[in-house]
Image (spheres, grey):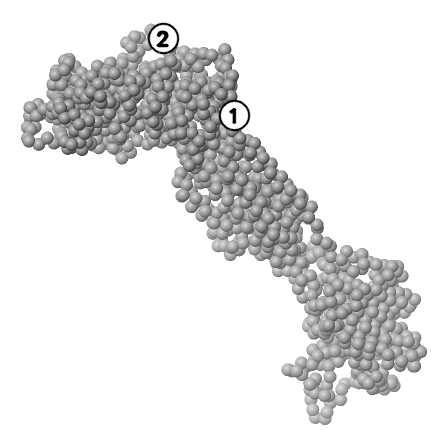
Amino acid sequence: MFVQLLLLLAPLATARSSYGSISSRSIASPELLELRGADVGFSQVNYNSTLLPPNRPRPPNCPPCFNCQLPAFNCGNAGECDRFDGQCRCQPGFGGQDCLTPLCGALSDGDERYPRPEGELCDCKEGWGGINCNVCKTDKACKAFLPKSPPSDGLDKSEDEDEDENDMVCYKGGLAVQRNFQMCDVTNRKIIDTIPDNKPPQVTFSCTAGGPSSNSSSLSSNPFGSFGNTWIQDENLGECNFQFWVDRIESFHCELSKCSWQSKDSFDSNQTNYNCKEIECSCIPGRFLCGEDGSVNIDDFLSEEVKGPGSFNCVSGKGCSFEEPAMNQLINDIFGDKSITLDCESGECLHYTQVPGYTKPERPDNSVWVALSAALAALIFVLACLLLWYLGRTHRHPEGFGGVKLPEDEAAKLMADHVPATLHFSNISYDLPSSKRVLSHITGTVRPGELLAIMGASGAGKSTLLDILARKAKSGRVSGEMYVNGRDIPDEATFRRVVGYVDQEDTLLSTLTVYEAVLYSALLRLPRDMSYQAKVFRTLETMNELGILGIKDSRIGESGKRSISGGEKRRVSIACELVTGPSILFLDEPTSGLDSYNAYNVISSLSTLAKQYNRTVIFTIHQPQSNIVALFDRLLLLAKGQLVYSGESERAQQHFEKLGYECPKGYNIADYLIDVTVEASGDHRNNNESGKAKYNGNSSATRSTEIRRVNDNDDAAENGFASTTTTTPRVVDMRDRNDLSDDTSSENMEEGEGVLSGIKSKASKLLGAFTSSTTKSFSQLSGSSTPSSAEEHIKPIPEKLASLVLASRASDDAKIVEAEIMRIQQGQSPNGGNAIGLTSDERDLNEETKLLKGFKKASLWTQFKLLSGRAFKNLYRNPLLMATHYAVAIVVALVCGFFFYHVTNDIPGFQNRLGLFLFILSLFGFSCLSSLGIFANERMLFMRERANGYYAPITYFLSKILFDIIPLRVIPPFILGSIVYGLAGLNAEVSAFWKFIMTLVLFNLTASSIVLFLSVAVADLGVANLLGSLVMLYNLLFAGLLMNYDRVPDGLKWMQTLSFFHAGYEALLVNELRYLQLIERKFGLDIQVPSATILSSFGFHAQAFWWPDTALLAIVFGVFTVASYLVLEFFVKERR
């Protein structure tokens, strides 16, 4: 940096002489000796006070009055006359009314300098010298010219640190950069000898670049650019001043204008040349050489002859010379010398970057960084695209089983470990939180190898009953008893191991193939000690049973992008449950949305499963066709939550015929039963035309059916309800039907009309009894001793429906089921034997319990691996979101690189960095809102898979975090940061680069964790999106750029402290700007301002990168990640 400067000064230092000095000169004036470091006190100097200029004579009777606008008064030493007040504005180092009095102190004192006391010499401040203390001696003396930075919190520096960081230097090279001052001794031998009393002749010489300036400590602008071997060619040329002193009293002065100067360097010396086109000199009256007694007066000579051009030349080691044609001639004629020769010392306070010969360090060339970062980002993007293309291909499997065979040692493993399950349920009732009764006293049973179909009109409670039997979490109140194999199983986890549940709505990942969807279910839920080959075989076997083996490589698809039909998708859902071979399989509307052929195939496969594999199958169905009804083993018919029939399917028609409901020939018995329940419930349209249409237009059948229905007014009259001409249906309070059903069960009803008359009698009995006060409450039926408030909300039912309900309870099937349940409650087996003496086809109690509890599914690690693979497949097979994130990162990085290309190290560059970092953080913060859909789209899938025992929530959560969210939150910041860092020309240190990347990644993960929490905690996607936007805007407000930290009220500063935007923004700024020196060119010099000073004025802290910024980001990420899991574990559950 100082190479050229050292070259200028090296030869001088070798000769132990300074710029403009004469190496052979042995005697120098005290001023020069002091400037050269000698310890010389001015008290030793013989100063002749008689040589002081005499007082200017005053006009008689007139006080002294100075006005430079009058011809009698002038401003000396290039002082400027102020036309407003008639006073002189003096050059630095001169004062008084006429600018002829030297000033003391130091040049840096500015307007605070004081005039030289009369009869004394100036006592200059430390580091300053010369007759008028204008020449600097040390760098420390120039420190006062450094612009002061405002104090900042936590950034105040000690004096020692301030001194070490002083960028001002005392330049002694002699070349004027802004305003140069020189102190010289005249060395012409004859001139020295001519002056009497050894009075030393001296010269002061100063030059100002660009013209004069006032007596100020400010350094004026330098319009000439760099210096070297080039002459100044600017139109606004510099000006110089020349003063001649005798015994430190000024004799005359010259003002030189239109000056230019240059410096010439060589290996052993440096040379400076000042050339001025015009010179104007003037004497100071009464001074030596200007009319003083005993001396000559050269006043006329100076004013008339000395016109220029003039030059001031210095060569290191040889001294200086002042030349002007007329003056040279005078010196030659009188003293025999060519010109005035001088021995000089120079001094000028400059910033180190302004020293002639200083070469500003070139900006680090980060083109390699740009190329490498862009290439790396492009490589990552290309590799990601290739990887997605390769992994996204659907792997084709061989047709059929593809050579997969079940190992011999596991050929019968599923059957050996199978637990045949008989399900009994008694008095199942369900009330909504509003106390509305949905189901009332449902009783029934189903055995291994049987299909139980739950039928009923819409709203009859079919799905509700199925959910209760499958022990799904319900929002209302459930009462009643359930038994599996004659025992109650309170352990829900054990119960889930032997059951499967297929929802009415298909919830499958659209990106998986049919084979993968079923295989994942098998791998997650089949016993862990079962081999992979056996699980694959079981998967293919199940798909073959359901007729979907031919589409195993087809993707499931979604709405608008369908790959398989609705019926095929339905069978895939069933296959996911069948593959585990559950003892009890529950299905909600398995034929919904299927055509008749596919619907029959589904029920047929369920029948095969039940009979061949001894499974228990329970499903709801809505008006099946006749060939499907033929496959039913047992039928449970509901109407408005009431049990209308429960028994063998083939005996249902006979049961209703006994009640007077004969199904017309050619009519589907299932449709007919639904119509009967609808009419009995009072929901049918009460007109003859609809009645006729209902029975296919067969009026005779209609009439016969009407005649045979329970509508007897005579029996009603026996209880005090005489019939009138109206036929309005009567209603019955079913809270009393259990008492009456007990009476019914004790009677022996006869076939045909005997049964009918008995039912009519009991219905009439009900109508008379619903006003009785001796009734049993619902709570008593469910085992509670206190009456339930739900009793008051149980609506009475129509008389016809009451008759059907009573007939159901009076049936043989109902009596058998009630007898079995009674035996179970008494500790016996359902078939009447002791619990110890079981039949040969039933398992021992201990063996069965051991099988149930010993069944172990996939371990947590296996679940995590399987779910991670599934999540990753879902991500790369739907690459639009991920590809968009990567593409946006590249495009935005290039755009930022274009607008913020090579930010400068000045105030505008500081502002650009603030904007760049805030823009990048805003981009990543708001782009994280795309994570809202990642879980929201799978919320229903997660709840149903969790309810069916697929996996533990922790494994699902970790797989989503590691293999779904992280690829979208780690790679994009790395791509964008790698590109924009080099293009913007940010801090070119390896550690700073990786801190930058780390901060972006950590910020992105923090923002995504908050969004993930909202996605998990808020089920409504629109509300979650709104809350996510508000959270981002709140954090952006307190980032630190839009609102100053010091202006935030003390009680609300915690809001900014907790803002993760503020933490990330401050970390980026501190990493980039902590040690950066901003160079702003003001007042003719490059002012260096520490970036940390400006950061502190914005409210940022230079020591905050690791703590609290990085730590806060990590803490927020951890807290919201854990909170998301806790919400997922305890609150995101299936509730029906």
Seen in the picture, residue 905 relative to 688 is either above or below; the reply is: below
Q: Earlier in the sequence, mark 1 or mark 2?
A: 1
The disc at residue 841 is 2
Q: Which mark is residue 1100?
A: none
Occupied quadrant, residue 778: top left
Q: Position of residue 283 (x, y in %)?
A: 80, 83
Could you tell me the amino acid type at mark 2?
Answer: Asp
* Image quarter hosting the N terminus: bottom right
> Crowding at label 2, few (<14), some or many (≥20) Cα neighbours within 10 Å?
few
263 shown above or below 1069: below
**Secondary structure beneath label 2:** loop
Q: Nearer the viewer, residue 404 or 974?
A: 404
User: Quick check: 99 above or below 570?
Assistant: below
Foreground residue among 306 and 201: 306
What mark, if any, has residue 396 been given in the picture?
1
Residue shown at the point (30%, 25%) measured from the top left:
621
| Residue 680 can be seen in this image | no
Circle 1 Cα neighbour tier, 10 Å, few/some/many (<14 / 14–19 / ≥20): few
In this rendering, position of residue 484 left or right of residue 47: left
Q: In percent of the image, x 50 and y 35: which residue is there?
A: 878
Q: Which of 413 and 482 lies nearest the eye of the viewer?
A: 413
Left or right of residue 211: residue 596: left
| Residue occupying the point 31% across, 11% down | 829
Query: In the rendered image, which quarter is residue 190 located in?
Result: bottom right
Q: Which of the 4 quarters of the picture holds residue 779?
A: top left
